[in-house]
Each structure stands twice: as structure tokens, then as C-alpha cells.
Image (cartoon, rainbow, N blue to C red):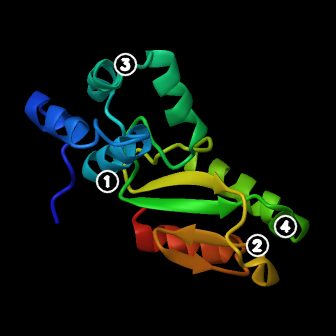
Amino acid sequence: MQPPASTPSGEELHALVSAHAEREGPLLPILHDLQDRFGHIPEASHKPICDILNISRAELHGVISFYHDFREAPAGRHVLKVCRAESCQSVGGGTVAEALLAKLGLEWHGTTTNGAVTVEPVYCLGLCACAPAVMIDDRVIGRVDEAKLDKVLAEAGA
């Protein structure tokens, strides 16, 4: 599988945005399509979206930054989401998260230098009975400790 292109062509971008321009409330479907196609919302798409939808850049930025699943830069090959909710925090999730970030030398939303893993906070994975929990791509893992997390990172190539 080839990674998505990081910069859309003008024609491709115009076609993608125009496909939704006549819909009621087209902005979120446009952003989802861009995210699906490019893995993030490319900066080059901002002006055409604003022009076609007649919205300001501030309005667009507000929507992109409000929804945590929209990215302004491509993520790593794997996305590791670490639960930050109360159940996970109460059984050591905070300590595990701090150790993870320190080990990788990252802040939240950071990506390892080799592009293997992006680390993101999430506020409940629904695995409270098996806390602390993480999710790597689409796989949820419970009762995570530093050793289990090291194994997940090794599998991901971090």
C-alpha cells in the first residue's frame, strides 16, 4: 500500500471540495475526505475551502482545531492513543504515559523521528475494567504497563 500524497494537486483539491459545495453543512464532509485522502488537512487546501464555502480562515482553523481527529500534519505509520480518563489515571496510566513520552522524547501529538509512531491522548477507550488502556491503530490493549508498552512499540518499529 502506497502512502497518501501529502500535497494535493489544485485540480484534485478543487474536485474534492466542489463535490460537497452544494451540500448543507459541507465543511465536515470536506475535511473528512481530505483527511482520508491525505492523512491530514493540507495547508494548501485552506484557501480553496474558504473561497468555495465563503468562510474565513479563522472559522476553518476553529473547526480543524476543535475536532481532535483532524491533523494539520501527517501522522506516523502507527497512531498510539493513550487513555487519559479517570479510570486509567487511577491505576497508574499517568505514570505509564509519562514514561512513554520520556522514552520516545515526544510531547503529545508528536511523531518519532523515524516516522513509525504518533502518540496522542484520548479520553476513554471504553476499556475501564482493564485500565490502563492504549490503542495502537485499531487494536485496543488493556492492563498496560511499561513492559507491555515496550512490546507494542517494538512491534510498531519505534
What is the spatial separation of the Cα atoms under label 4 and label 1, in whole angstroms? 34 Å
Q: Position of residue 48 (x, y in %)?
A: 26, 23
* Circle nearer the N terminus (4, 2): 4
Question: Is 82 situated left or right of 109 in this image?
Answer: right
- Give amino acid for label 1: Asp
Q: Can you identify the residue that label 4 sits on?
A: 92
* Circle nearer the N terminus (3, 1): 1
Q: Choose top left, top right, bottom left or bottom right for residue 2.
A: bottom left
Residue positioned 73% across, 81% down in the render: 143
Q: Can you identify the residue that label 1 sits on?
A: 36
Q: Measured along the vertical axis of the image, is residue 33 above or below residue 155? A: above
Q: Can you identify the residue that label 3 sits on?
A: 54
Q: Nearer the viewer, mark 3 or mark 1?
A: 3
Return the residue nearer the eye: 145 or 63.
Answer: 63
CB atoms of marks 4 and 2 within 8 Å: yes
Q: Can you identify the residue that label 2 sits on?
A: 132
Q: Measured along the vertical axis of the image, is residue 121 above or below residue 19? A: below
Dot 1 alpha-carbon crowd within 10 angstroms: few under 14, some 14 to 19, many 20 or more: few
* Circle nearer the N terminus (4, 1): 1
- Give amino acid for label 2: Pro
Q: Nearer the viewer, mark 4 or mark 2?
A: 2
Q: Secondary structure at mark 2?
A: loop
CB atoms of marks 3 and 4 within 8 Å: no
CB atoms of marks 3 and 1 within 8 Å: no
Q: Secondary structure at mark 3?
A: loop
* Circle nearer the N terminus (1, 2): 1
Q: Nearer the viewer, mark 2 or mark 3?
A: 3
Residue positioned 85% across, 63% down in the render: 89
